[in-house]
Image (spheres, rainbow, N blue to C red):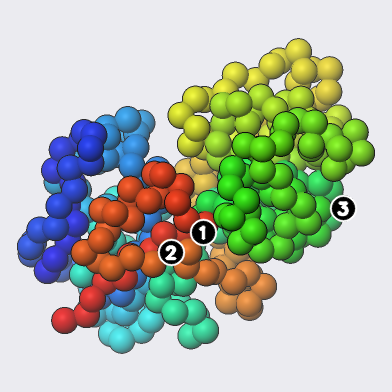
Amino acid sequence: MKAWMLRRFEKPFALEIAEVPRPEPGPGEILIRNHAAGLAFGEMLIFDGTYQKLPPLPYIPSNECAGTVERCGDGVTAFAPGDRVMVFAADMRGGALAEYCVMPQSFVFPCPERLSFADGATALMNYWTSYNALVRRGHLKAGETLVVHGATGGVGSTAVEIGKLIGATVIATGGSDERLAQVVGADHVVNSNREPLRERLLELTQGRGADVFYDPVGGDVFDASMRAIAVGGRILVVGFTSGRPATPRTNVMLVKMISVIGVEARRALLETGEEGWSDFHAMRDWIDSGRLNPRAGHVYSFADARQAYDALLARKHSGKCVVEIPQR
């Protein structure tokens, strides 16, 4: 089968298409014929060797895909060949940017008929991150004000959607008017490259500040959040795509009773037992019922996967980048 492979940790990324043996499912595993794979910003930290836990090489990227069941290993009873499925490799094992992948059945879920495979490849990782952040970790309530930084990205756009579903007033921030115009559902948008972020957020909240900040960016954006937060507010640290992890100001945290909360949704799923999986299935129910609507952002061909990662790094597109995998 054809697969994209990472052979070295370096910049520029050492990615290449290779012909490799098709994997075979063991007990409790499922062989999936991939139709589309979702790409994530964090994968590029693996590519250049800066991620906190690096996989063995060679490594097939992508932890999210959608396709059909090709074969089931012994003990698999929930799926059969031909079933439409979505995959989320919560342990970051990779393997989805290939014509086939093998996953444990606990990482495989039915794909609703209303979703295309490209949309299905965006349905789990980002929505789970935002659900875990806003519902479990941030305790966002109806009537509160939520600021979503990086709202034009794949993960930020899902936070906007979930925030509105909960009943919050949502302020979306980003650095491009064109991309902010594509954000669906936000009550207000702020271009942080053209407007002073702190001042604009205070203006939109009548000087009170926002209750919850969803922050995958870090750096200067986090610093502005600390100065535009309501008493008792919460900052959800989802990432630091700016490249600079921020330092919370503990004096402000004390005086304003602020909580700075780390969000690692994969660990929340794998290490919190029934709580994590119960929340995950509740999020999936929102997708299955149509309350959440996964949408692929920009779709690339399999041959152009390298360009897709470059575009993701350059923040050229809104939403999640997806690679379609040809069937042969």
The answer to whether residue 257 is seen in the rendering is yes
- Element at badge 3? loop
Horizontal side of residue 55 vs 119, given as left or right:
left
Label 1 or label 2, whichever comes before in sequence order: 2
Disc 2 packing (10 Å; few <14; some 14–19; many ≥20): some
The amino acid type, in three-letter code, at marker 3 is: Gly
Image position, residue 148 (x, y; %): 67, 46
Q: Which residue is mark 3?
A: 143
As measured in the structure, the alpha-carbon distance from the residue carrying label 2 to the one carrying label 3 is 33 Å
Vertical relation: 214 (above or below) 246? below
Decide which of tag 2 and tag 3 comes sooner along the chain. Answer: 3
Q: Which secondary structure, mark 2?
A: strand
Pointers 1 and 2 in contact (C-beta within 8 Å): yes
Which SS class for mark 1?
loop
- Dot 3 or dot 1, earlier in sequence: 3
Task: Reply above or below: 58 against 284.
Answer: above
Q: Is residue 305 above or below residue 189?
A: below
Indicate which label's residue lies in the foreground, 2 or 3.
2
Q: Residue at x 25, y 61 (%)?
A: 304
Q: To which residue does mark 2 refer?
A: 298
Q: Separation of disc 3 and disc 1 at Cα?
A: 26 Å
Which residue has dot 1 on it?
319
Locate residue 103 relative to residue 110 in the image: left or right. left
Q: Which image quarter is the N terminus in?
A: bottom left
* Image position, residue 87 (x, y; %): 38, 66
Gap in angstroms between the C-alphas marked 1 and 2: 7 Å
- Tally of numbered discs: 3
Q: Give the amino acid type for the residue marked by disc 1 in the picture.
A: Gly
Q: Position of residue 29 (x, y in %)?
A: 27, 67
The amino acid beneath tag 2 is His
What label does residue 49 carry, if any? none
Residue 134 placement, left or right of 145: left
